[in-house]
């Protein structure tokens, strides 16, 4: 039998520096008997030479379409829009199972080419939890952006352009520097503190020097009494990290922020959960997603009151591409090691079953059957 093989493709989405396979995980797969092809990619946070040193075979940028049809292609984000049929097996986030814009056209490419999609968002363990997700570094980076916004506000400014950091230490240093050396004295509230994003936010606040008592960690038990919560108005930064699954009372409203008047301490809300357009968004004080070049949106709380802004960036882990990739890829590794047995390994069998269901829906929607 030929060796199990994976082909890491380049990422074509602008600003995406993360990778589904890192040199660390590629090395472990090679040690387990895999052949790993890696497309050269300037955009990726890891140098091509790091993959080469790990034993990967480098191939030219964006050449996966010419790979043998039985070689599975792994990547992170969506492929560029096209109607080219897809004959390969792809492992990636495709964002086409929840009827997102263009969902049926994406799946129609697999239908026409006979390929298979294993969507990374739907690889679950036996308890239905994702085997790999980017949450921790989303929370970490979101909390950092919040602290940077407070620092900017102290100088009477809005937070400017955010750019990816080479590593976590550089991010922590930058945040501390912007706060005059330490975050000590700041007070933060994290809701959803027991989850992936929440733990990341708490970790950042610790690393920039907040006192433990000044990091309020709330989860289900603390919000059970139902919002709005006056406690939110009494911290500098509120980070929302909950996984919203049903309608819940708002955590904060524009009215409560206005009613707090001139004495309100809250300066920045970081909505990591970003349920921006969800009718049950528990933070109904903004309605757009913000971006790296304009990270904050102002809440209209009246000129007589201190400013309040929201950060609602929906791809925060991109700010820490190296650590976010290492963590994600490391969590994915046990499943990748089972990939050669995908016809019987539970995680892959379930993902393929879901793909086939979605494929059938798309074929009908596209009038292909
Ligand atoms: N902005 C980004 O870049 C980005 C990146 C990754 C994930 N996310 C989003 O962040 C959210 C959280 O993801 P996660 O992986 O951390 O989820 P998770 O399931 O690991 O954690 C969610 C936490 O929220 C808690 N929670 C749920 N409802 C709550 C409530 N009403 N009150 C208090 N706590 C509550 C849960 O108990 C859990 O501890 C998701 O919506 C996810 O899509 C955003």
Image: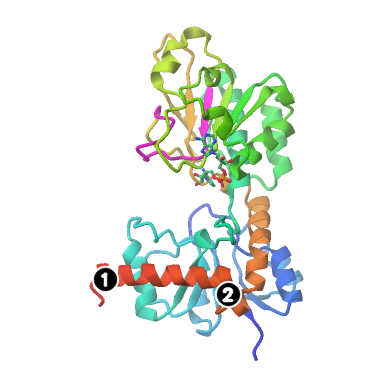
Q: Position of residue 33 (x, y in %)?
A: 72, 80
Q: From the image, tell me which residue sits under label 1.
A: 364
Say few, some or many: other residues with alpha carbon within 10 Å of mark 2 (under 14 / 14 to 19 / 20 or more).
few
Give the quadrant of residue 179. top right
Mark 1: secondary structure:
helix
Q: Seen from this angle, which residue lies furthest left? A: 367
Residue pictured at 68% horizontal, 39% vertical: 171
Asked whether residue 271 is drawn in magenta, I would say: yes
Q: Position of residue 316 (x, y in %)?
A: 55, 44
Say few, some or many: other residues with alpha carbon within 10 Å of mark 1 (under 14 / 14 to 19 / 20 or more).
few
Mark 2: secondary structure:
loop
Asked whether residue 74 is drawn in magenta, I would say: no
Residue pictured at 63% horizontal, 36% vertical: 201
Residue pictured at 55% horizontal, 79% vertical: 343
Label ID, residue 60 = 2
Query: Residue 348 versus residue 9: which sits nearer the camera?
Result: 348
- 147 shown above or below 171: above
- 50 shown above or below 271: below
Is residue 82 among the parts visible in the rendering?
A: no
Residue pictured at 50% horizontal, 76% vertical: 89
| Quadrant in which the N terminus appears | bottom right
Ligand 1 placement by image quarter: top right
- 245 shown above or below 158: below
Q: Counting residues from the N terminus, which is met first, the one under dot 2 or under dot 1?
A: 2
How does the figure colour the protein chain or chains? rainbow
| Residue numbers of the magenta segment | 267-285
Q: Position of residue 357 (x, y in %)?
A: 38, 69
Is residue 122 among the parts visible in the rendering?
A: yes
| Quadrant in which the C terminus appears | bottom left
User: What's the CA distance linking mark 2 and mark 1?
Assistant: 37 Å
272 relative position to 207: left or right: left
């Amino acid at each position: 039998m030929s060796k199990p093989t994976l082909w890491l493709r380049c990422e074509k989405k602008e600003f995406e520096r993360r990778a589904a396979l890192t040199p660390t995980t590629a090395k472990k797969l090679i040690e387990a008997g895999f052949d790993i092809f890696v497309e050269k990619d300037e955009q990726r946070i890891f140098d091509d030479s790091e993959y080469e040193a790990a034993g990967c075979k480098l191939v030219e940028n964006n050449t996966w379409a010419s790979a043998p049809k039985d070689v599975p292609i792994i990547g992170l984000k969506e492929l560029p829009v096209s109607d080219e049929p897809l004959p390969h097996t792809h492992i990636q986030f495709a964002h086409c199972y929840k009827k997102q814009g263009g969902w049926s056209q994406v799946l129609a490419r697999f239908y026409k080419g006979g390929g298979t999609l294993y969507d990374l968002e739907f690889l679950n363990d036996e308890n239905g939890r994702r085997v790999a997700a980017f949450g921790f570094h989303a929370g970490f980076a979101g909390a950092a952006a919040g602290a940077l916004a407070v620092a900017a506000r102290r100088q009477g400014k809005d937070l400017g352009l955010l750019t990816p950091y080479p590593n976590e230490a550089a991010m922590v240093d930058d945040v501390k520097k912007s706060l005059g050396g330490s975050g000590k004295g700041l007070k933060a509230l994290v809701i959803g503190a027991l989850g992936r994003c929440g733990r990341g936010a708490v970790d950042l606040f610790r690393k920039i020097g907040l006192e433990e008592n000044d990091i309020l960690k709330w989860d289900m038990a603390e919000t059970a009494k139902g919002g709005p919560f006056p406690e939110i108005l009494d911290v500098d930064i509120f980070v929302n990290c909950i996984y919203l699954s049903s309608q819940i009372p708002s955590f904060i409203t524009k009215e409560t922020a206005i009613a707090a008047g001139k004495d309100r301490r809250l300066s920045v809300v970081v909505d990591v959960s970003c349920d921006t357009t969800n009718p049950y968004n528990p933070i109904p004080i903004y309605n757009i997603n913000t971006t790296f070049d304009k990270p904050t949106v102002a809440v209209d709380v009246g000129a007589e009151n201190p400013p309040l802004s929201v950060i609602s960036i929906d791809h925060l882990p991109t700010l820490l591409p190296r650590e976010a990739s290492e963590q994600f890829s490391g969590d994915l590794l046990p499943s990748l090691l089972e990939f050669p047995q995908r016809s019987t390994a539970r995680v892959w069998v379930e993902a393929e079953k879901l793909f086939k269901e979605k494929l059938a829906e798309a074929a009908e929607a596209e009038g292909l059957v």
